[in-house]
Image (cartoon, rainbow, N blue to C red):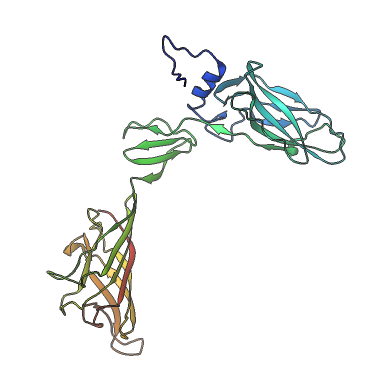
Amino acid sequence: MAEFSAPFDTSAITTELQWSRMARRWGLDGVHSEDPASTALKVTGSGAGTVAVAPGMASVNGFYYHLDATKNLPVPANAGGTARVDLVVLRADPSANKATAEYKAGGATAPTLTQVEDGVWEIPLAQCTVAAGSSVVTAANVLDRRWFTDRGAVPSLPGARRPSVKNQLLVEDNNLYLGDGATWNWLAGKSIPESRYTPVWSAGPNTINWGSGSENIGHYQVINRRVDVTIQLTPTGNPAAYNEPIGVSLPPGLPATSEHRSLFIWNFVSGNGEGTAVGVGMIFPSEGTSKISRLRYPASGGTSVSSPVNSINLLTNQPFNIRTNDVLTIDGSYWLA
C-alpha cells in the first residue's frame, strides 16, 4: 500500500498526472466565461478550407489553456459520398506536454471524445458538418458545443454586493441570487424540506380528541416565505358536540402573516352515509396566526339569485356528526409572518 499527499516540503507535485488529479477538483472542464454569448474559443466556419477558433481561456482535465490570437484549423477533405460530422476539440496531451485546439474528423455521426484519465483528454468546442466531396465548412454548418466553467456561488454581505455578473450565483443572508449583468435577481431563499407534524384540533378553548389511533397528519414544506400545507384527519372516535367552530394548528414555529386572512380549501367525506362537503378554511389574525380558526361552508336561504347567502362554521357535530371513518382534508398555502 502506498499513500501520497502534496504539496509538502518533502512531498512535492512532480508529475503532470499528480497535478491533473489535484487541479481538476478545483473546477470543471470548460471555457472560462460567465456568459455563453461570449466568443471565447468559439469556432466559426470560413466557407473555405479552414475553421477559426477565437481567442480565449479554458480548463481541460486540470490543465490551463490560453489562446491569445485566432487559430485557423484546416478541414480534412471529405472523400465519402455522404456528409461527414466532425468535432473541434480542446485536447490535453500529457505525453506532448501541451493542450491544443484540434480538428477531429468523424463519420456519419460525430467522433467520440477521447478521455483517458492519465492520457489524452478532450472536451468539445464545436460540431462541424462537411458535405460529400468537400473540405469546406460554412458558418451555418458549425454548431457551438462549448462547455463552460466558472466560479461557484460567491458569498455577499447585505449592503455590500459586488456589481452584477451575468450568470453568476450570489449567496446573501440565506438567499440565492442570479446575476444578469445589470442586477442580482432573487432565485430562492431559506427553505424547509418536506416535513410532517401532528396538528392540534380545537373548538374554542377545548382541545378536540378524535380518538386513539386517529390518522392526524400535517404535511408541509417552506419555500422562502411561502408555506404549503396539507392536513388530513380520519377519526377513530366521536368527540363531544362543541358549539365553537373547529380550528386546527399550523406547522409549529411557522406563524402566518397578520396582514390578511389566508385561505385554504377543505373537503369532508362521510364514511357514515352523511354525504360530502367542500368549503374554505380561514386564518383570522385577530384570533391568532398559528392556526386555521374557521372551516366555513356556503349556505343560502332560498333558490333565486336574490336569496340571502351566508357561510356557516363547521362544528364537530354540525352539519355532520364527525366520527370514525369520516375523512377531513385541508390544503392550501400561506405567507409567513
Q: Residue at x 41, y 9 (%)?
A: 9
Image quarter of residue 141:
top right
Q: How far from the left and from the top, in percent, is residue 194?
A: 35, 54
Can you say whether 146 is above or below 290 in the image? above
| The quadrant where residue 333 appears | bottom left
In this rendering, the count of numbered labels is: 0
- Residue reaching furthest to the front: 1
Q: Quadrant of residue 17?
A: top right
Question: In this rendering, would 318 be left or right of 95?
Answer: left
Direction top: furthest residue: 9
- Residue closest to the far left: 205
Please tell me which residue lies in front, 4 or 264: 4
Note whether 176 is above or below 136 in the view shown: below
- Above/below status of 109 relative to 278: above
User: What residue is rendered at 68% in x and 34% in y?
Assistant: 126
Q: Nearer the viewer, residue 316 or 155?
A: 316
The x and y percentages for residue 182 are 46, 36
* Image-based side of 37 in relation to 11, left or right: right
Residue 91 in the figure: left or right of residue 19? right
Q: Position of residue 43 (x, y in %)?
A: 68, 30
Q: Position of residue 241 (x, y in %)?
A: 16, 80
Residue at x-position 68% and y-position 26%: 53
Residue at (34% x, 81% y) in the render: 276
User: In the drawing, does residue 133 fall left or right of residue 226?
Assistant: right
